[in-house]
Every structure is written in structure tokens, then in C-alpha cells.
Image (cartoon, rainbow, N blue to C red):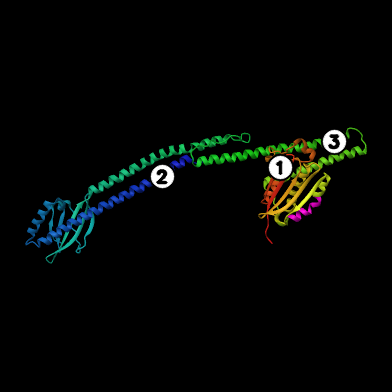
Amino acid sequence: MRAWSIRTRLTLLFALVLGAVLFVIAGTTWYGLRRSFAEAIDRSLTDHGTAIGRLLINEGTPASLAELRDDLREYVALDPGWNMVRILDAAGTEIYCSPALAASGVGPDVRDDVAPPRFRDIVVGEEPFRIVSMGVGVGGERFAIEVALPTKEIESALARFRLTALLLIPVAMLAAALAGYGLARTALAPVDRIAGTARKITSDRLDLRLDVPPTGDELQRLSETLNEMLDRLHDAFRRTRRFTADASHELRTPVALVQATAEVALRRERSADEYRSALRKILGEAERTSGLIDNLLTLARADAGAHAFARERLDLGQLIADHREILASLCADRGLEFRFERAAAPHVRGDRSALSRVLVILFSNAVRYTPAPGVVRLTVGEVENHAVIGVDDTGIGITAEDLPHVFERFYRADRARSRDRGGEGLGLSIAKWIVEQHGGGIRIESEPGKGCWVHVTLPADQAV
């Protein structure tokens, strides 16, 4: 079963809510009118009954029933509002009944105690009446006074109001549905445009962007948010494709060299020294390829979020001191001067092997791009509850154009010399990822011809 569209659901909801509101308003109004009419009728009947009782009290008991009837006829004639009056004595004998009440067929109230005003509704034939019965004492005698009022016109007016409301509410709901459908269609038109554009966006057309309606509402924010998401996806696809292409290129080169070296060695008979030389070249390329594959796997795990680092308390100064001999030998092999400065003994919480890898990556880069004679300086200290590692060199440096891209994968500031120097352009990407996973940051400053200054900050562990 196909689900209803948002436009249809909004239209129905709008119509139903409006219909419910109108029904409640009409019902409340009808009830209020009915109550107001009833109170007005009861007040009028009570006033008439009280006036007749006052008349009897002021006049006193007439000498005869004939005189009483004559007096009542005069008052009824003077005020047509009293034309439905009946008076009974204590025994229930009818003393007076106006011609209109007699003609209506409304019978008397046979109850004895009518001192408090008592109201009742009766229907004679098809004519509804509202009647008040009340008692009055005159000269030691009790009389019952009944005043009636036909309510057919009032009931007819309420019925017409009810019928009109029942007819108008569906019409109003239909009009509201049509208006709501139009409003929903207008309001959701940008959503249709967004959906249309979104259908055109594929992995090959990530440059397309959604139209942003200048409405300042949720649709504009939604379009802007989706465009920002598309920007991130486009950038991720671009980096992934470039990463794949660069990785393929980097892997193709050593494989081609191994294949070429083996083919040359096998082309004719050679001496043992020549075979050993060929195998050394193959071994060197195999080691280089193994390192590249290891770096690629590290980055793949990083992208998948599948790598979990240990969290132990480490003496960062001691960690660096443990690598001091290795770092010094790297400098000695290249004819460089090694300097180590330890300003403090900060502790951090992290993975020993991962932080050691960061140290080796940064130091190897400094040694690789610093020609002899030169200096590579390693410092460790603490600044504002942060451990700071610095690797400074007097090497060739990095240009301002290349500096923003050095953490990108496979990026090389000097592609012509990178392979000869042994780099694949992945080390800084891995170092940045490891540092960020430890809650720290890495920053590089450089000036061509004067060297690089790499600063790593990590949250210091103050626990004792």
C-alpha cells in the first residue's frame, strides 16, 4: 500500500483540526445561547409570577372569586406578557386561568408545596412550553401561581443555528483543505526541487549543489546543511580517489623495479656478485614496499576507526631518552649534529609504540631533508599543562605554497627527490592522526633554506 504524501497528510490534518475547532466553537456557542435563553425565560417567568403575587397581596383577598377574576383579567389585558396565567387555591381549585393558557391545553401543577419557584418543560401537541409554579400567601390563605411561556420560536432559532453550523462546518473544512493543499504545495515546492537535484547527484557528479531558497526558514537551513555535507563528501571522494591513484602509483614503481631487476639478472649467465647485487636491489625495494603497505594499512584502519590505542601513563622525557641513541645514530650517518634538550619531565597518557612512531617519523623527516653539515634538535618540555615535543632542523625547509598541504596523503613538496630520499608522503599524515587520537595537535613552521620547526602538543597527565 502506497503511503500518503506529506502534502496530502498536511492537508487532511489541517482540515480535520479546523473542523474540530469549528465544531467545538459551534457546540459551545449553541450551548451558551441555549443556556442564555433559558435563563432569560426563567427570569421573565419569575418576574411575572412575582408581579401577580404582589398584586394579590396589595389588593388583599377579594370579597368574591368573581372580583378576583375581574381584577386579573384587567391586568392580563394591560400586559399581554401575562396572557398565560393560572391561579389555584390551597385545595388545587382553579381560581383563574387566562384564556390563552386554557386554550393551550397546559394542565395545572398538582403538587402541594410550590413555595419556591419550580420550573418545568412540557409539550402539548407540538408546542413546547416553559412553566414556573410559585406560591404566595394572602390573608392567611395560600395560592399557587402558574405562568407559562411558549418556547417554540426559541427552539426553532436554536435548531436553525445548529443546522447552519452543521452545514457550514463541512464547507469550511473543504475550503480549508483546498487552501491547505495550496499552501502545502507552495511550501513543499523547494523540497521537490531539492529531491530533483539530489537524484542527479552521483559519485561522478558530486559537484552539483542544491538550490538554497532565500527564505530564512528551515528549508534554507536544510539546503545549506545538505550542501555542506555534499562538500565534505566531495572532498572525501576526491581524497580517496587521489589516495587510491597515488597508492597504485607507489606500489607499481617498486614492483616494476623488482621485475626489471629480475629480468635483467636472468637474461644471461652472471657472476655470483652480480646476482647478489640484483638480490640486494630486490630486497631494498621489497623492504620499501613492505613499509609502504604497512603505512597504507595504518591509514586504512584510521579511516575505518578500527584502531584502538592503549592508554598508559608515560614519562615522555624517558620515552625520548630511550630513543636517543637511535636518533643520534641517524644524524651521525648523515653527518649531522644531534642536540637534545629536556626542559621538564612531563607525563602523558597514551600508547608507547604509537608515540614512538610519531617521534621517529618527525625525526626521520628532519634528517632526510637536512643536508650536511646541519643540526637537528629535539626538545621536550611542558607548557600550560601540555607536554610539548619540538623537532627543529636547519634543512631545506618548505615553501609557503606547500606548507598547508604537508599533512595530505602522498603529498610531496619535492616529488623529484622524494623517492631518492626514501619518503612516500604518508609519514606526516600518520603522525597527525596519532597525535589527534591522543587529544593533541601538531604544527609546522618553516622557511625555505632555513629549516623546519615541528611542534607536537599532548595533554599532560597530572596524576601522581
Q: Residue at x 68, y 45 (%)?
A: 303
Secondary structure under tag 2 reads: helix
Q: Main secondary structure of the magenta part?
A: helix
Whether 114 is drawn above or below 170: the answer is: below
Whether 414 is drawn above or below 382: the answer is: above
Residue 398 appears left or right of 233 = right
Q: Give the mark, 1 or 3, whose residue is nearer the N terminus.
A: 3
Label 2 to label 1, Cα distance in Å?
A: 69 Å
Residue 77 appears left or right of 390 = left
**Cβ atoms at labels 2 and 1 below 8 Å apart:** no
- What is the span of residues highlighted in magenta in the rendered image? 316-326
Residue 243: name its quadrant.
top right
Mark toward the viewer: 3 or 2: 3
**Cβ atoms at labels 1 and 3 below 8 Å apart:** no
Mark toward the viewer: 1 or 3: 1
Label 1 to label 3, Cα distance in Å?
A: 39 Å
- Report x, y in % for residue 342: 75, 54
Q: Find disc 3 in the rendering and name its residue.
A: 261
- Report x, y in % for residue 46: 20, 57
Q: Find disc 1 in the rendering and name its residue.
A: 446
Q: Nearer the viewer, residue 388 or 96?
A: 388
Q: Nearer the viewer, residue 218 or 452?
A: 452
Indicate the amino acid at tag 3: Thr
Quadrant location, the C terminus: bottom right
Indicate the amino acid at tag 2: Leu
Residue 457 appears left or right of 66 = right
Secondary structure under tag 1 reads: strand
Indicate the amino acid at tag 1: Ser
- Report x, y in % for residue 148: 19, 54
